[in-house]
Image (cartoon, rainbow, N blue to C red):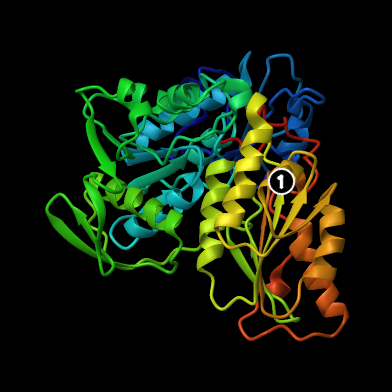
Amino acid sequence: MRGWSAREVAEAAGASLVRDRAVGDGPLRAVVDSRLVGPGDLFVGLPGARVDGGEFAATALEAGAWGVLVAPDRDVAGTDGAVLAASDPLAALQALARAWRRALRADVIAVTGSVGKTSTKDLIAAMIAPHRRVTASRANFNTEIGLPLELLAAPEDTEVLVLELAMRGAGQIAELAAISEPDVGVITNIGPVHLEQLGSLEGVAGAKAELLVGMRDGGTAVIPAGERLLEPWLRDALRIVRFGPGGDVDWAGDGTVAAGGERLSLALPFESAHNRRNALAAVAAALAVGVRPGGAIDVRFGDLRGEKVALGRGALVINDCYNANPLSMRAALEDLATQEPAARRVAILGDMLELGPDEREHHREIGAAAAGAGVDVLVAVGPLAEAMLPAFAGESHAVPDAAAAARLADQLVRAGDVVLVKGSRGVGLEVVAEALVAVDQAAGRPDPVGSSGAAIGPAAGSSRAPVSAAPPSRPPDAG
């Protein structure tokens, strides 16, 4: 938006220009937290359940904001900067983001799915980066508020924009697709997530398929091979690319991907089966925008997503507690089974939330999966996770919450163990790894060579919500 005048910004947002700027270029980005405002920013005052962000408009201008976008009844007289007014500031923010997406003329790739969205988004960006100027959305900026903020932060020389779309119910992916207007839509998988809202796997598929319905004719849909639940939502006007066994893009052995008659050699910094599947989706997306990926793929996944923490006591923690559902739990247990060497495999597993009336059965099945994955010790954290234990024959423990799990883990974990920690974000299991690191450091146990333990800190997104920003209508871990 840097080259836009205040009037052009207002027109793109469908807002009224209450006060113009005498000089200067357009805004660099949009922000909804007045504490983060800097020179060149457009502050958008969103109404929230407890506070109206418009109350902080004058504060934002005093901090050097380029201007503010607020409801018409906000008085920001006496301060410098442009003032735009709209009866629905969020709708105006979204309209502005759509206008900037069109002005960029970049290829837009949108990624959704029950699990693996963020990792796949990161892999797509990493594969494209050596070839074209790519911008990828940050973690958690995947909702009706975060997505437009990421669009508006994209530099004007962006050639490929990779966005993550999250949802908790029907209609929400359609809303995000209407804002981002993707050229390529990626659905990583369909699984039992948000069943409380969607009722069934067919409901989940329909909600995710809103991405395909919202895409323009001629766009490319990247979907898992053999996923029958998506078939009703496909149409002839889309180019369909299937990834995985039996699909158009699949592993051909020796680090080679077979794609449309081509052979692409990739060197990936991981061996986990679920991320190798995500890599296939990423290859398909990259090819759809004219990039032929190959060689070493330089990617780093976000915090709490399979992060490995070497402890001073000689154990290894796989800190994978960003979120959890039956699909991601099984994938994490499959990965745990491959970890070598391991004196014991310990799984500290928390409640999986929002699974609907069959939630206890889903947890029981994970207990059976843990047994099948060769887990030696299972710790169930929370009332739902306790249902895992009857299906697990090995050493097991049940604790009520994350704090109790952290105390028990200090007693259980010993040298040579590989420890998986995973649960829904609402369980807060990140404290387990933090506590183990802190105890080892207090005891003077040196970190092993290559340990990332010293870097463990508060989990991303764990800080208190800003008082000057409207809280998102969905939590950060929307799926």
| 228 relative position to 409: left or right | left
Q: Quadrant of the C terminus?
A: top right
For badge 1, the amino acid type reads Pro
Quarter-of-image position of residue 90: top right
Residue 62 image position (x, y, % from top left): 75, 40
Q: Is residue 468 left or right of residue 11?
A: right
Which of these two is toward me, 87 or 459? 459
255 up-or-down from 172: above or below: below
Q: Toward the viewer: 429 or 362?
A: 362
Task: Name the residue located 79 percent from the left edge and 27 percent from the top edge.
Answer: 55
Residue at image point 73% right, 44% down: 385
Residue at the image position 76 percent from the left and 44 percent from the top: 386
Residue 109 appears in which quarter of the rendering?
Answer: top left
Tell me residue 133's x, y (percent): 34, 54
Q: Which residue is mark 1?
A: 390
Secondary structure under tag 1 reads helix
Residue displayed at 86% across by 54% down:
403
Q: Where's residue 327, x and y in %?
A: 52, 43
